[in-house]
């Protein structure tokens, strides 16, 4: 099908039978200011480094900017700046004052929401519709939410004396850069800690934009330090003797390395790792809503989502019906320019990620699963992958077990609720899950038996700063968000 029509400049809203033709609806990015070069943000100043690396726009492979590469010495400089700020002002500041700074960050971010959305989509490849409606507003909501907690910590832990931990080292992945930064920075500051945060290799820009917001908010120098680099930079931060707590979001593989390297130290640790979530559809589910939930569960942010509903479990009696509806819905997904407001699926974040996805999908085909992709044209430049699903998947296939972190769904069936639970829990991971049924009692029964940190009923991928998020098993430990998220940044 010619469904990648956002890219067809000639056709104007014409209807081709059932298939719609869309005119381009690009978000204007002409007013966006991206510097040629971004230095580290340490002690309230821009600090140059010896080495720089490029960040590109994955939808067209154009270089957006050069950013600082922080080596071990640079990391130490950031950590000691955070220490100084902690000892000098932040730990002694009345909680109410801390709250005011966080509120200020939230409000300035709100004013610049549009700019942040556009840059997030350019640097990472995600559709502007998502960065504008999800990433940026949710990031702002997190700052507002934790601003409110700053002077109420004693209510969160009645009868106890919650104290800040000190300097928090925070490491984030590339799939939700600003949002992950907000999840980490907001509670850390509210609880009275100072921060060194490292962005991911391919998406450093919105964090450096956030540095500008932090300056504008007048936060005392060194309370938040923002650095960029690769795994080595992250490792220096983890191993820095000046860090009291590590908060990591990323792969299970790196999570294990971090855990090993801080074993035997006094450092506190939270890990938010990978997932392979089951999305369970019962025969009594509201099917149109469930199909939307399947789409949102796996194709949101190109499937670069740790809690993606990447394992669909469909009750056998409705399998054919669900597949038919799903195929029909997928024909209408528009893949293309992330800055087009009609785009549903943007660019894959990097060539490395595209390689990983391609390799796993090939393994699915080789192992005998049946692949479906709608017939759409992908742009010539940039990194792209068609929305994909597999049927005839067996429990032992790699695509049923490994996290693909791309727009690829594995579909399995079940007959009874017991079998659904067994299959859903048959994974090393335990981050999220979804249950679709018309019966409340059934849904409560099932969700009590699922071993996952976050479970959605008749919806998927819904987030709120007041609800805790985190995993079981190899998906990590510790909770971010809500009152639970405070505990990770306090000695109680
Ligand atoms: P990654 O683990 O390779 O990288 C994540 C971050 O860790 C990056 O900033 C990277 O530079 C840094 N890093 C790499 N090696 C390091 C080391 N040895 N020591 C310290 N830091 C190091 O993961 P990725 O490929 O960037 O991201 C994808 C993974 O992240 C997926 O597995 C996904 O499930 C997971 N993820 C989890 C969540 C969650 O909340 N649970 C959210 C987003 C992504
Ligand atoms: Mn980039």
Image (cartoon, grey):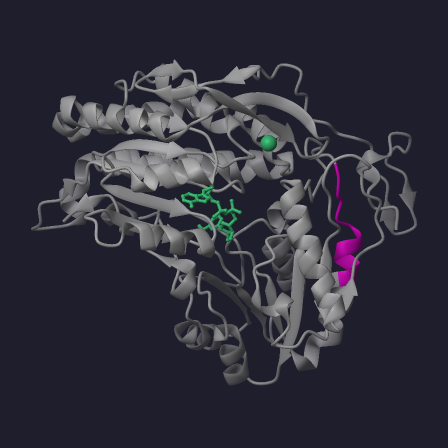
- Residue 145 seen by the camera: no
Q: Which residues are magenta?
A: 327-336
Q: Residue at x 46, y 40 (%)?
A: 231
The number of numbered badges drawn on the structure is 0
- Residue 356 seen by the camera: yes
Residue 33 position, x and y percent, is 57, 15
Q: Is residue 281 left or right of residue 192?
A: right
Residue 397 position, x and y percent, is 64, 72
Q: Residue at x 73, y 31 (%)?
A: 60
| Nearer to me, 217 or 317 | 217
Q: Quadrant of ligand 2?
A: top right
Q: Is residue 336 left or right of residue 164?
A: right
Residue 448, compared with residue 456, is above or below; it is below
Q: Is residue 437 left or right of residue 195?
A: right
| Nearer to me, 454 or 322 | 454
Residue 238 position, x and y percent, is 33, 42
Instruction: Please tell me in which quadrant of the rendered image residue 396 appears.
Output: bottom right
Residue 303, compared with residue 395, is above or below; it is above
Q: Residue at x 65, y 38 (%)?
A: 127
| Nearer to me, 94 or 405 | 405
Was residue 236 drawn as part of the magenta stretch in this picture?
no
Residue 14 position, x and y percent, is 90, 38
| Nearer to me, 145 or 309 | 309
């Amino acid at each position: 099908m010619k469904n990648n029509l956002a890219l067809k400049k000639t056709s104007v809203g014409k209807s081709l039978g059932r298939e719609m033709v869309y005119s381009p609806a690009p978000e204007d990015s002409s007013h966006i200011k991206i510097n040629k070069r971004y230095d580290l943000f340490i002690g309230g100043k821009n600090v140059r480094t010896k080495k720089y690396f490029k960040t590109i726009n994955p939808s067209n492979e154009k270089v957006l900017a050069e950013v600082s590469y922080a080596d071990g010495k640079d990391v130490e400089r950031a950590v000691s700046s955070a220490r100084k700020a902690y000892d000098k002002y932040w730990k002694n500041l009345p909680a109410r004052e801390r709250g005011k700074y966080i509120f200020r960050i939230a409000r300035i971010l709100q004013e610049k929401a549009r700019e942040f959305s556009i840059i997030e989509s350019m640097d990472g490849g995600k559709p502007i519709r998502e960065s504008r409606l999800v990433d940026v507003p949710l990031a702002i909501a997190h700052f507002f939410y934790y601003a409110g907690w700053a002077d109420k910590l004693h209510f969160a832990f009645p009868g106890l004396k919650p104290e800040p931990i000190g300097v928090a080292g925070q490491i984030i992945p590339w799939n939700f850069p600003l949002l992950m930064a907000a999840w980490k920075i907001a509670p850390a500051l509210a609880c009275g800690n100072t921060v060194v945060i490292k962005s991911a290799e391919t998406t450093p820009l919105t964090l450096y934009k956030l540095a500008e917001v932090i300056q504008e908010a007048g936060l005392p120098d060194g309370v938040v330090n923002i650095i960029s680099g690769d795994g080595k930079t992250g490792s220096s931060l983890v191993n820095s003797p000046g860090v009291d707590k590590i908060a990591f979001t990323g792969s299970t593989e790196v999570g294990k390395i971090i855990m090993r390297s801080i074993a035997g130290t006094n450092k506190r640790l939270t890990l938010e790792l990978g997932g392979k979530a089951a999305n369970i559809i019962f025969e009594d589910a509201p099917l149109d809503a469930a199909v939307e939930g399947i789409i949102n569960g796996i194709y949101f942010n190109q499937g670069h989502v740790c809690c993606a509903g990447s394992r669909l479990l469909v009750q056998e009696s409705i399998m054919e019906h669900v597949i038919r509806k799903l195929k029909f819905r997928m024909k209408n997904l528009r893949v293309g320019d992330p800055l087009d407001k009609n785009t549903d699926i943007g660019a894959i974040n990097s060539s490395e990620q595209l390689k990983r996805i391609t390799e796993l999908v090939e393994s699915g085909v080789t192992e005998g699963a049946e692949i479906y992709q709608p017939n759409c044209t992908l742009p010539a430049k940039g990194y792209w992958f068609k929305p994909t699903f597999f049927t005839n998947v067996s429990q032992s296939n790699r695509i049923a077990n490994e996290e693909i972190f791309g727009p690829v769904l594995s579909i399995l069936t079940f007959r009874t609720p017991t079998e659904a639970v067994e299959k859903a829990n048959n994974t090393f991971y335990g981050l999220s899950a979804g249950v679709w049924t018309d019966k409340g009692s059934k849904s409560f029964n099932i969700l009590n038996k699922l071993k996952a940190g976050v479970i959605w009923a008749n919806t998927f991928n819904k987030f709120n700063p007041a609800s805790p998020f985190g995993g079981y098993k190899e998906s990590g430990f510790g909770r971010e968000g809500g009152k639970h998220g405070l505990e990770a940044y306090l000695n109680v």
